[in-house]
Amino acid sequence: MYNTLIVFASEHGTVEKCARELFLLIDGKVDICDLNKRDIIPDLSGYDSIVIGGSIHSGKIQRVISDFCVANLDLLINKRIGLFINCIYSGEKALKQLEEAFPRELSDKAVVREHFGGEINELKLNYWEKIITKQMIDQENLVVSLSKEKIDHFAKTISNQDLYG
């Protein structure tokens, strides 16, 4: 049985929702760690796979995710890695954001990378976030939704024991 750790940071709840869905879908023993709510990170050496997820704001992933990746890069590149983002874009823009969200060494090593889409919960947005988000959606005709299919595929891929080397 393989051990997986899901490390994430969620500003408005969407990344947490996706991380919890992955927690339920990934085979084996799975632990979950919200970097925004934890001061101590579990010992990464005890895990076969590590999933890292965050959301994109103003074109960048949260600093806590970026800092985690940089601080643990030497250990992470020796693990099975899965990377995901949540963003309101789809297609080429989402792929570009996914490409730029994580260090190149991690992206190249990942067995699965995906953008799951996004959600807008206006109750959790501040005044300026509401205005900016609404403008982006209106100006670019964005359809904002989460992809259950991408989450399912991600979980199946990271769970695939044939990919363990």
Image (cartoon, rainbow, N blue to C red):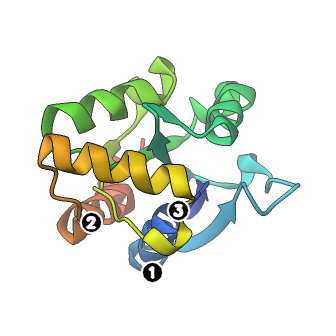
Report which quarter residue 155 is drawn in.
bottom left
**Viewed as shown, does residue 86 lie left or right of 140?**
right
* Rendered position, 118 above or below 75: below
Question: Callout 2, which amino acid?
Answer: Leu
Report which quarter residue 96 is drawn in.
top left
Residue occupied by mark 2: 146
The local crowd at label 1, few if under 14, some if 14 to 19, many if 20 or more residues have their Cα within 10 Å, is few
Residue occupied by mark 1: 24
**Viewed as shown, does residue 52 lie left or right of 134?**
right
Q: In the structure shown, which secondary structural element does the residue marked by tag 2 occupy? A: loop
Give the residue at x 37% y 56%: 158
Question: Callout 3, which amino acid?
Answer: Leu
Give the residue at x 40% y 36%: 110
Residue located farthest toward the right when viewing the structure as drawn: 39
Give the residue at x 11% y 48%: 141
Disc 3 and disc 1: Cα gap in Å? 27 Å
Viewer-side residue, 70 vs 127: 127
* Rendered position, 50 above or below 68: below
Q: Earlier in the sequence, mark 1 or mark 2?
A: 1
Total count of labels: 3
Using the image, tell me which numbered label, if any, was put on residue 125: 3
In front: label 3 or label 1:
3
Residue 160 placement (x, y as % from top left)? 32, 59
**Viewed as shown, does residue 15 lie left or right of 32?**
left
Q: In the structure shown, which secondary structural element does the residue marked by tag 1 occupy? A: helix
Any part of residue 86 in sight: no
